[in-house]
Image (spheres, rainbow, N blue to C red):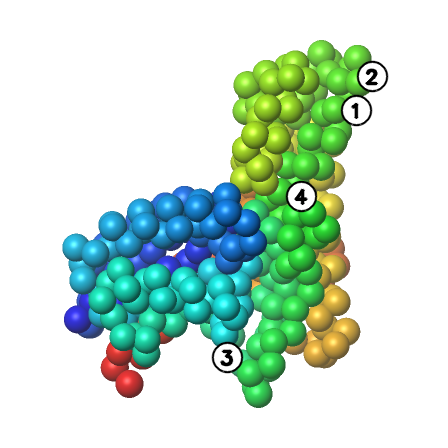
Amino acid sequence: MNVLGIDGGASSSKWVVLDAQGGAVAQGRVAPLIGHLFGDEMRARVFAALDQLLAEVKPHAPRTVVAGITGLDAGTKEAGEIRGYIQKALGLSEKRVVVLNDMDLAYRAYFAPGAGIVVYAGTGSVAYSIAQDGSVYRAGGHGFLIGDEGAGFWIGKTALRHLMRWRDSGLDTAPYPLAQHLYAVLGSRDWTGIREYVYGGGRQVVAALAPAVGRAAEEGDETAAQILLQAGRELADLALTLRHRLGPLPVVLCGGALQVSPLIEQGARELLELEVMYTSSAETAARMALDLQNS
């Protein structure tokens, strides 16, 4: 019998179906799937993404599901609502569907409980550790309005702030690689167009500017390079915050934002030793589902 693993993220959501032997049957990507079910508009977006995902996986008939959803904790009302929705759509019993925080998946991909600290940098950022008794310790992960330092949104926002200062000072026509790469993604040099891009698309489109910062840094733009180095330092600081509480545990740095530039890793290594790893959280979820199904 097939199993399904879901990694619900702020920029996109990934899913993997495995067969009973752990072989990959199918995988895909849909729109963002987050646990912030705080308003009608956001709820509509989340359940539209979930509908799309479930329509894609139904032909593979998964009998057990583990889903890690960003911005959501196991045992909450929101987790129960999403779990019930998946159960009904796939015709599964309650014990066959587990919904938890996406960082629970990320942590288990690298460490056993009590063994380390994971710093994740995607659209947002967080440092996360699970103790041997199951207690969760975290630093950051407070959302783009008040946190998410060093991650994709932070990189895009910081670059935009530089661009707006240059523009207000009449300097944005200078041959700054960062300005040129940002304008190419924004699709406009006018404030009206920039405003529509930023405030019409939300945090995902701001985070989507991060690769432009990486490209500018590759061309020698010093401002872009400093933004990326500082992003790494901010991520390292999250790990150091947890180390003050938990002791000198090993640190793994992971997440899609790291693919923007090696300067992020370089900046983090200025402050502490760490490992950079890339593991599919969707596959981790699917393997947890397989273990649940076989238990």
* Residue picked out by circle 1: 165
Question: Which comes sooner in the sequence, label 2 or label 3?
Answer: 3
Q: Which residue is mark 4?
A: 154
Single out the mark in the foreground, 2 or 3. 2
CA gap, disc 2 and disc 3: 52 Å
Q: Residue furthest bottom?
A: 133
Callout 1–callout 4 Cβ contact below 8 Å? no
Which of the labelled discs sits on residue 61, or is there none?
none
Q: Earlier in the sequence, mark 2 or mark 4?
A: 4
| 3D distance between C-alphas at marks 2 and 4 | 23 Å
Q: Compared to 89, does 260 lie above or below?
A: above
Q: Residue at x 22, y 67 (%)?
A: 91
Type of amino acid at the residue the image marks with label 2: Ser
Q: How many numbered marks appear?
A: 4
Mark 1 element type: helix
**Looking at the image, can residue 215 be seen?**
no
| Label 1 or label 4, whichever comes before in sequence order | 4
* Residue that numbered label 3 is attached to: 112
Residue at disc 2, secondary structure = loop
Q: Secondary structure at mark 4?
A: helix
The amino acid on which the numbered mark 4 sits, given as a three-letter code, is Trp
* Label annotation for residue 169: 2
Do the numbered discs 1 and 2 sit on residues whose CB atoms are within 8 Å? yes
